[in-house]
Amino acid sequence: MRRVRHLPLVSFREGQESKREGFPTSTSADGYNSAHVPAQQHPARHRSSSDTSRCAGPRVQHRPFGPLRFLAGAWRGDQAGEPGQGTAERTYQFVLNDRFLQETNTSTYPPHDKNKAGEVHHHMSMISYDGARKRFVFRQFHTEGFVNTYVQEQTTDAKTIVFVTEAIENIPAGYRARETYTILSNDEFRERFEIAEPGREFELYSEAHLKRIR
């Protein structure tokens, strides 16, 4: 797989992280942080025409991305696993009025005994916050045609981010994938990618150790 590759990131203590990074800890079911939204701009409240006239320009709503904000930037590091020993280059940036976190990734594996041609893999992702479920959703698109939809798993470790697929497109039914991000510092993290074939447990496919380059 990858041939199902890189089918193939949580629960942070969001209140702690939000306070530490200056984000409000009260988030409504629709994902809006009411504490930072003036009454006349809150989407769930009626606004009169006079209110509307005072709201010139686009409204930027604060989203609960506190636990993932450290990812914004460019990263590079070593990657190893079934495809061999290689490198990964990755960027994360907030897009569309800061409502989504976009990732682009290139993994390069030089030729070796088991893969004479080597391998270059590309994927891009969008991470959003589902206000109804109060969890991050991570959609990943691969050059091989796979589309993985991951949903955040709850964890007790504030330095660990876990996503498990709820659906994978263009692969036989029953396959699952899991991404685990271990934060080593604000400028360094480790990513573990695992695959489970139908009816089987997760097995490690690749692991990357990434450091910030900007």
Image (tube, grey):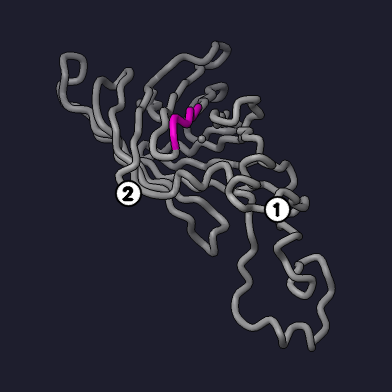
Answer with the quarter of the image where residue 157 lies.
top right
Q: Is residue 45 left or right of residue 147?
A: right
* Residue toward you, 169 or 23: 23
Is mark 1 in CB contact (under 8 Å) with mark 2?
A: no
Magenta residue span: 180-185
Rendered residue at 43%/53% (across/down): 93
Mark 1 is surrounded, within 10 Å at the Cα level, by few (under 14), some (14 to 19) or many (20 or more) other residues, namely some
Of the two numbered discs 1 and 2 on the same chain, state the one appearing first in sequence: 1
Left or right of 43? Residue 209 is left
Name the front one of labels 1 and 2: 2
Residue 8 visible from this viewpoint: no
Pick whichever, 214 or 128, lies toward us: 214
Q: Name the chief secondary structure element in magenta.
A: strand
Find residue 131 and report its horizontal and vertical position in percent.
71, 49
- In the depicted structure, whether residue 105 falls above or below residue 59: above
Residue type at mark 1 is Gly
The x, y position of residue 188, in whole percent, is 39, 34
Residue plotted at (63% across, 33% down) = 11
- Could you tell me the amino acid type at mark 2? Arg
Q: Quadrant of residue 90?
A: top left
